[in-house]
Amino acid sequence: MHPDLLYQLSLTLVPNIGPVQAKILLQHCEAEEIFHAKRSFLEKIEGIGPVRADSIKNFNGFHLAEEEIKFIEKYKINPLFLTDEAYPKRLLNCYDSPTMLFYRGIADLNAPKIIAIIGTRSHTDYAKQVTEKLVKKLSSLNVTVVSGLAYGVDAIAHKAALKNNLPTIGVLAHGLDQIYPSEHTSLARDIVKNNGGLLTEFRSNTKPDKHNFPTRNRIVAGMSDVTIVIETGLKGGSMITTELANSYNKDVFALPGKVTDPKSAGCNYLIKNNKAMLLTDAQEIIEIMGWEEKKKSDSKKQRELFIELSQEEKLIVDILKQKESVHIDDINNQSGLSSSAVAGAILSLELQSVVLSLPGKLYRLA
C-alpha cells in the first residue's frame, strides 16, 4: 500500500471537506502535509477558511481510515487517489471529481474509448433490442462500456458488453463489500472475471442509500467520452446523469421513442431541448466522436514534409502522436506552455490541416 494512503483516506473523512475542497487543498500540499499544516496556513487558502481549517485540525478519525485499509488489503481492492496514475483522467476534468475511488478489476479506466449506457430500470423490449444491437455494432471499436449495474438498461448494457467480449465497468452507489441489487451478484462476478471492473467512491459498509445514486451518477458521466440514454421518463437517475454529462461538456445521445410512451418521455425531452443528440444508429456516435478507422495516407505524409512548424507546434504534434486523441488540459500540462500559446498553436495547426478538433475538447492528428 502507498505510505500516504492513511492520510489520503482520512482526507475523505474530514467533515466539511468534499471533493472540491480536497482538490483545492491538494494544489497546495500533499495529503499528509494537509494534516500537519498550521491552522493559519490552511484558513488562508481560498475556498477553505477558518471553519474547514478547524475541521482538519480537529479531525480524529484516523482509526476509520486504518479499518478501511484492512478491508482494502484483505480483498485486494485498488484504492485510487486523485493523483494516482491509474485514476480515471477524464474525471479530473470535472470540478467535483471524487477524492478517492475504490476499484476491483483490470479494465483500463483510461481506455481510449469509453461509453456510458444508461436508462430506466423498467425497460421495454425495444430498449433491450436497441441496446444489444448498439453494443454489438460498437464492439469492433473495442469500446469500454460503463453503467450502474442497476436493473433494466444498465444490466442489459453490461451483459451485451460481456457477450461481445468488451470490457465493462459497473459504477456502484455503495461499498465493495456488497452488491446492490443482490440479484446482480453473479453479473458483478462475471464482469470482474471477464476483464471488467467494479468502481465506487464509497467505503466499505456504505449502504446503497437513495442519496448515493446521484453521487454515483456523476462518475458514470464524468469518466465516459459519451453518455447514451436508451430509455427514461422525465424524472429519475438517467435524467440526473444526463444533466451532469452536459455540465461536464460531454456528448450525450438519446434514443427517440413514441410521444405517447412515458418511458421515452425523457429521451424525447432531451432531444427536443438540445440536451442530447438524436440516436438512430451506432454510426452516428462513431462519426460525431471521430472514431472512424483512420486510413494512413502517403499523400498526407508527403504534405507534412512541406509544412514548416514552429517550436510550439512541433511540441504539440509530438504530444498528439502519443495517443489517438488528447484533451486540451493534458496538452496544456504536458507542453508546459501557457494556455494562450497552446490555443494559438492549435489554431495554426488546424488551419494547416495537421490537427483535428473533436467533441469534448479533444484533439488528434489529421
Image: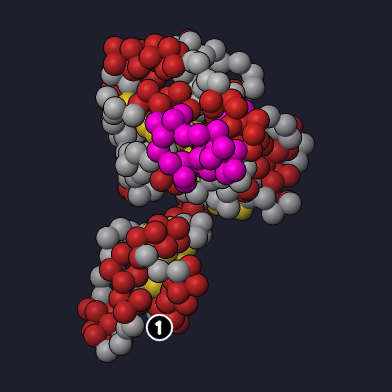
Q: Nearer the viewer, residue 45 or 94?
A: 45
Residue at the image point whose x is 58% and y is 32% from the top: 53
What residue range appears in magenta? 16-45
Q: Badge 1, how many Cα within 10 Å: few under 14, some, many 20+?
A: some
Q: What is the image's colouring?
A: secondary structure
Q: Is residue 304 positioned above or below 268 on the image?
A: below
Left/right placement of residue 227 relative to residue 268 reads left
Asked which quadrant contains residue 43, the reply is top right
At label 1, the amino acid type is Gln
Report the residue at 48% width, 67% height from top. Answer: 339
Question: Magenta region's main secondary structure?
Answer: helix
Residue holding disc 1: 352
Residue 272 screen position, x and y as percent: 73, 51
**In front: 29, or 257?**
29
Residue visible at 45% across and 13% down?
A: 64
The picture places residue 31, in percent across and down from the top left corner, at 42, 33
Where 147 falls versus 10 (above or below)? below
Residue placed farthest to the right in the image? Answer: 260
Residue 115: x and y in percent read 46, 43
Q: Name the quarter where the C terminus is drawn.
A: bottom left
Q: Is residue 33 magenta?
A: yes
